[in-house]
Amino acid sequence: MNKWLKLMALLMALLMLAGCNLIATDPVLDAQQVVAKVGDTEITKGEWLAQTENVLYNNQLMYYYYGLSYDVTDSQAIADARSTAIDNMITSEVLKQKAAAEGLDVLSEEEQAQVEENVQSDWSSYLDSYTTLYFSDSELEGEELENAVIARMGEDGITQDALRAMYTDDIISDHLYQFAIQGVEVTDDEVRMEYDGLVLDQQATLDATPTLYQSYVSNGTDIYYVPEGYRGIKQILIALDEDQANEISELQSTITTNDTALEDLRTQLDELQNPVEGEEPTATPGEIEASTEQVETQIAQLVEENATAQTQLDELQTQAYAQIEATASEALEKAQAGEDFDELIATYGEDDGMKEEPYASQGYPVCEGLTAYVAEFQNAAMALEKVGDISGLVKTSYGYHILQYAQDIPSGPVAYETVEEDLRAQLLSEKQDEAYTAKVDEWVAAADVERNERLLQAD
């Protein structure tokens, strides 16, 4: 009797499992299952999994941007994406409901007009892009062509209503952000304290490694401290012809590559001709002789190739520099005669960097030991003895340079007044973002949220 009861129980269990599997494998019913609720709003499994795909795709794009690989089929990546997706969907719905509760989902007439302007602008751009991408060879014309393009855009979810909803959501989100950050301010003491801390941090770094200052300036890093020993160097660049410069660069690259190969081959030849005493040879005398002849032939070919490339390089450089020498000499003569150097830069200079700040005002920052500039420029810049001095013609791979020792860049902390406004804005933005994040966490925690963990954790 017990045996039959056990068999019946096992059969019932199998039938129940089979029933569950039938439900789970029905794609329509499966997608309609509710994985979470925010108030009365349901989030279905289908919506959640679609959002998961978006998260995985965006992660893949981000990783690709940084040159990294991202496996969208990895189980941990999928689990993380699912967690992110449901959290984002719940938060989004909480914010939507909060905006409605506070009356922040109503747009002003001006905002509505801006939405429509953005929609029409984007719509026109999409029409042009899709026409070019998909209908460049089409025989359709006029309204018929436009309708076909619009239909194709619709396949990708691009409609005027979708664009309108997107821009409307953006404005509502900004309403909510402004609502959350009301009363957030930054005090004078906070700004000053931040400034003092940044000065100390940069001072410690730049006093230890002064050459970093040049890279800070080049990269657009905010500067709060300047180390000692920097001078500002302005230049008039009379550039080589672009095609000739490219050809010169290619020849120089060929010679450098061949020199590296020659060094390796000569090492191989030395090892063949001078084996280590006591070591048993791994090749027969005949094989060694054949290898030696092959390496010697390769060396001879590269030497000949380099000689030809060097001759071509010398001839091309002579021709290229001759073409710009008269202009460079004319500019140098005027600079040495005391004409305004900035005006000469505007008239003769071909370096776009000299037209941009801070270089246009203070020149390029140069100090001892820098490797950021080509050696000829660096050496000539440091050879100038006092502010106002003008160099002769400095020949580099870029062309002819005329350098001016424009100023000694003042060392020490930058003046508080020059960075106060930007620092205050930066601190305020950070403080507002922190306040908004805290409010969102508070609203989500207080919201009526139900999560179906059984479905959310299922494979």
Image (cartoon, helix red, strand yellow):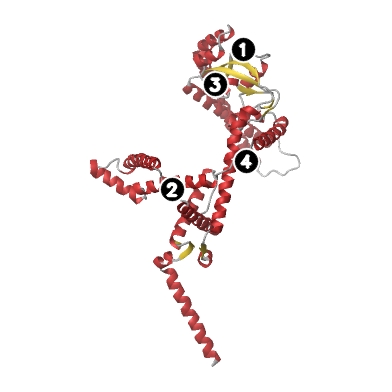
* Residue type, mark 3 in image: Met
* Residue type, mark 4 in image: Glu
Q: Quadrant of residue 198?
A: top right
* Disc 4 versus disc 3: nearer the observer: 3
* Disc 2 versus disc 3: nearer the observer: 2
Residue 169's tag is 2
* Residue type, mark 1 in image: Ile
* Disc 1 versus disc 3: nearer the observer: 3
Element assignment for label 2: helix
Element assignment for label 1: loop
The image position of residue 44, as x and y in percent, is 44, 62
Query: Nearest the camera: 337 or 304?
Result: 337
The image position of residue 262, as x and y in percent, is 61, 31
Q: Write down the residue under mark 3.
A: 354
The answer to whether any part of residue 309 appears in the image is yes
The answer to whether any part of residue 261 appears in the image is no
Residue neighbourhood size for the residue with mark 3, other residues' Cα within 10 Å, grouped as few (<14), some (14–19), many (≥20): many
* Residue type, mark 2 in image: Asp
Q: Quadrant of residue 277?
A: top right
* Disc 2 versus disc 1: nearer the observer: 2
- Residues tagged 2 and 4 counted as in contact (Cβ below 8 A): no
Q: Write down the residue under mark 1.
A: 390
* Disc 1 versus disc 4: nearer the observer: 1
Residue 287's tag is 4
- Give the mark, 2 or 3, whose residue is nearer the N terminus: 2
Measured in 3D between alpha carbons, the distance from the residue under mark 1 to the one under mark 4, in whole angstroms, is: 63 Å
Measured in 3D between alpha carbons, the distance from the residue under mark 4 to the one under mark 3, in whole angstroms, is: 61 Å
